[in-house]
Amino acid sequence: MSQDIIHVYFMPGMAASSLIFEHIKLPEDSFQMHYLEWLVPEKNETLQDYAKRTAASITHENVVLAGVSFGGVLVQEMSKFVSTRKVLVISSVKSRGELPNRMKLAKFTNAYKLIPTKKLSNIDVLAKYAFGKVANDRIELYRKYLLVNDPYYLEWAIKQLMFWKPQDIQANIVHIHGDKDKVFPTYHLKNFIPVKGGSHIMIINKYKWFNENLAKIILDEKLA
């Protein structure tokens, strides 16, 4: 394998498996793709400790980390423990200020504790919760993308997102976001590459856009 190969590590969204990247392609002469999966958090494990534990599976230097949704939050924390060429934040946020108002309110009112994580351990309920109304007629299609339905993991992940306290935004972060994302609406976001018509699950249904543009983004080439 050439030393010029760029290693790209992909982290899926909350409760999802790396299958969400199954249609994403990068030129094999320049890139090698690696897939990370969610670990069940240890009791009282902090997001920083979890990120360090996940980062331990990265075996290359100067990598690209690409994370979707809560996975985008995680790769930002992971980048503190590995050398990175770029950190790609997809359908996610870069700071607490970019969280939608309802999530900020949920933190201060403790409303996030009312999320029925035990019910979400049922994979069909979790699919509808994770993907919204679009999943109603595609439950079989989206069910395969959900890997972790452990109630403790779900409670932990929701709490970590609510209480995430990022430091300064890193210089090598590139934020890619759909203009139709209802989970993280764009009105609070700054400095991102918009994907026209992209929803929160655009990594699945807008994969053609990523296949046309992801390599260019990594290599700092101009997008079409």
Image (tube, rainbow, N blue to C red):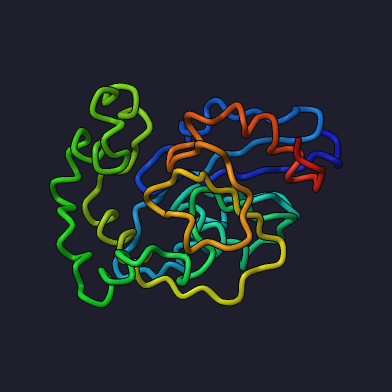
Q: Position of residue 222 (x, y in %)?
A: 80, 43
**Left or right of 114 in this view: 218:** right
Question: Residue 202, image x and y in percent?
Answer: 49, 36
At 66% from the left and 68% from the top, the residue drawn is: 170
Query: Which residue sits at x=42%, y=71%?
Result: 164
The answer to which quarter of the image holds residue 75 is bottom right
For the C terminus, the quadrant is: top right
Q: Quadrant of the N terminus?
A: top right
Q: Position of residue 12 (x, y in %)?
A: 47, 44
Could you say which is closer to the camera, residue 66 or residue 42?
66
Q: Residue at x 66, y 55 (%)?
A: 174
Q: In terms of depth relative to the viewer, which is nearer, 98 or 84?
A: 98
Please count the marks in the image: 0
Name the image quarter holding residue 200: top left
- 139 up-or-down from 41: above or below: above
Residue that appears at 25% across and 23% down:
137
Which residue occupies the foreground of this view, 136 or 117? 136
Query: Where residue 208 appears, x then y in whole percent?
Result: 60, 26
Q: Is residue 197 left or right of residue 82?
A: left
- Taking 1 as reference, is 199 left or right? left
Q: Tell me if 182 is positioned left or right of 138 in this view.
A: right
